[in-house]
Image: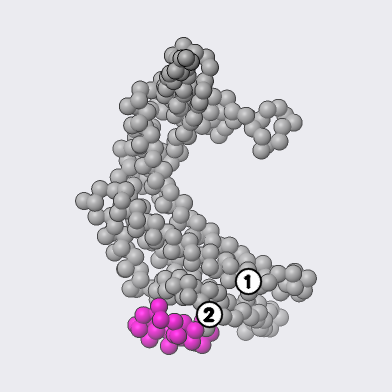
Amino acid sequence: MARELKIMTKHGLGTITSRSKDVLSPPESPVADINVAIGLSKDEYDELNNAMKKVLGLIQYTKLFNTVKRNLEDLINTIGSYLQAFIRKDANFLSRRDISLNINKDLLNVLASFRFYLDYMDNHLKNDFDQTLGLPNKFQNYCSEEYDKNFSYRLIYHLRYFAQHKGFVVGSISFQSNASQENRLQINYALEINIHRNDLLEDKSFKKELKTELEKLPAKIQVIEHFREWIKSLTKIHTQISEDLLPTVLDDAKMIKNYLTRLTYDEKDERIVPAIFTIDRADENSKKIFHLSHIPLPVRESQQIIEHLEKPASIV
């Protein structure tokens, strides 16, 4: 009968240094030098791993918020590319691209990421933090405050549901060119992205109070300016909840920094990444490794959290 193989599992703290195999190797085919410099007990490994998860969880919120912002930037850049083609009279560029399709696609990406951000924040604030901190209520209050005082935020908030029911949001797109009032030799160009007021009024997802506000707007609503005002409110919401969240992971960030003092490495070398390791061997003295895994430590993020709380400097 074959002898049952017993696996010895150990944990450690060390670094991974990425490098090319040789000077001719393509950058997408790196190799890594692993240096497990310090052994960790199971309790130390779990302690450090849990601290890391909390810090990365906080950073995840900011990454989601940045996704919303970047989707809005993509929308504005798409509009800008079409406007530049119009100014250049580049018929070939314009004819090869479905303007309405691409602008609607980018706009839907903004709305979808906005909804995901709100839903994700609401869910994780309820499940990942001590409820005595009242973080879910604080987040809802921040959202409600911006909803109440900013019409553009209210409009974009409900456009999410309108898009679910109707699909494409943009009703019409038009290029404009007019001589400047100040300088008759100067021409002002614009690409108007409009949603149709009556389409919104017919949608049941819009509240009565919002429909009353919509009735006062032009038949064609130029939506980009409302997106610019909406993102200001969302930025304020995210900044406020981030200020509430940062103190909850301060001890975890300091713990990570404290463990890192046990390592000796060149902190300025971006190729070197501190990490925690799990190593499986056949026995304690065996050189044969059955399995090795690592988790990079959030060094920069932990330092930013500590610096922000000890000498205020925003990381959002």
What residue sits 44% from the left and 60% below the top? 116
> What's the distance in space between the residues labelled 2 and 1, CA to CA?
14 Å
Q: Residue furthest right?
A: 92
Q: Which residue is mark 1?
A: 101
Image coords of residue 285 (percent x, y): 46, 11
Callout 2 environment at 10 Å: few (<14), some (14 to 19), or many (20+)? many
Is 99 magenta? The answer is no
Image coords of residue 133 (percent x, y): 24, 51
Q: Secondary structure at mark 1?
A: helix
Start and end of the magenta stretch? 197-222
Residue closest to the eye, 21 or 289: 289
Q: Which amino acid, mark 2?
A: Ile
Rendered position, 164 above or below 34: below
The dot on residue 247 is none
Residue 50 lies left or right of residue 70; in this view the side is: left
Evaluate whether residue 264 shows in this view. no
**Picture quadrant where residue 175 is located:** bottom right
Residue 239 lies left or right of residue 163; in this view the side is: left
What residue sits 50% from the left and 26% below the top? 292
Q: Residue furthest front?
A: 1
Q: Which residue is mark 2?
A: 195
What residue sits 39% from the left and 84% below the top? 211
Q: Which amino acid, mark 1?
A: Leu
Rendered position, 91 above or below 259: below
Mark 2 and mark 1 lie on one chain; the one further toward the N terminus is 1
Q: Residue furthest top?
A: 285
Callout 1 environment at 10 Å: few (<14), some (14 to 19), or many (20+)? few
Evaluate whether residue 99 shows in this view. yes
